[in-house]
Image (cartoon, helix red, strand yellow):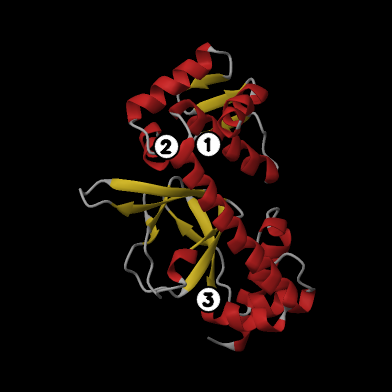
Amino acid sequence: MSASADSTRIEAVKVACSSCNLRELCLPLGLSADELDRLGRFVAPPRSVRRGEPLFQAGDRFTSIYAVRTGFFKTRVVADDGRDQVTGFQMAGELLGLDGISSDRHTVDAVALEDSQVCQIPYEQLEKLSREFTPLQQQFHKIMSREIVRDHGVMLLLGSMRAEERVAAFLLNLTQRLQARGFSPTALVLRMTREEIGSYLGLKLETVSRTFSKFQDDGLLEVKQRDVRVRDAAGLRRLVAATSC
């Protein structure tokens, strides 16, 4: 790549990062202009992933992590009986690909639930730069810690909660993450299907659908297919709190 082309690419990444309203949720948090320039030297411009397409698949060689710039993804593994088991949902401002760090191979598929964009960050160069820039290293550790905490939350869902409590906790977590990104905490469009929610929560499709209907009858939600309005967040929180009492 020529020097002028490289300079153009770096500038495009700098503009993308500096103008991104998710910057405070992503890796560039706290970087100076010079440090952002260094990061931009190896971060590729945003890459588009069409709905239904995999960003990477289980068994692929791990080389990069990906910051979701726009859109929504699910991660999944294929169970022994051939069914998909959803292991997580990732939205703008969150990272994909951390599963491959330990074994140098991805252990899950990452599939776009809608047309999306990601920023690709080569892991080897990220590690090197993290050792030089403490803020970048600290932010990366915070993101990894956030993922661990989320995994523990899923274990709690599957281990101790009834169906209604699982769905309530899922919706509250989703609205909290959306609110952190500047979206409404009460109105959301579910990018995933009821079946995918059930796979993630360890519930049958019929149970998820029945629970949504019950929440609507109880005045907790207003549901129109994938459009959901939370009418009583406190009521959802009381359901979840009942588990820890």
Numbered disc 1: secondary structure: helix
Residue 66's x, y, as percent?
52, 64
- Which quarter of the image is occupied by the C terminus? top right
Residue 235's x, y, as percent?
63, 21
> How far apart are labels 1 and 2 at the CA level?
9 Å
The residue indicated by pointer 1 is: 170
Q: Is residue 159 left or right of residue 118?
A: left
The residue sitting at 57% across, 39% down in the picture is 174
* Residue nearer the viewer, 19 or 186: 186
**Above or below 166: residue 124:** below
- Residue at the extreme left: 81
The residue sitting at 66% across, 82% down in the picture is 131
The residue sitting at 35% across, 35% down in the picture is 195
Mark linked to residue 197: 2
Amino acid type at circle 1 is Phe
Mark linked to residue 123: 3
Amino acid type at circle 3 is Tyr
Q: Is residue 31 left or right of residue 196?
A: right
Q: Residues within 10 Å of mark 2 (few under 14, many from 20)?
A: many
Residue mark closest to the camera, 3 vs 2? 2
Amino acid type at circle 2 is Ile
Numbered disc 3: secondary structure: helix
The residue sitting at 45% across, 24% down in the picture is 225
Residue 229's x, y, as percent?
59, 24
Mark linked to residue 98: none
Answer whether residue 167 is visible to the viewer in this image.
Answer: yes
- Marked residue nearer the N-terminal end (1 or 2): 1
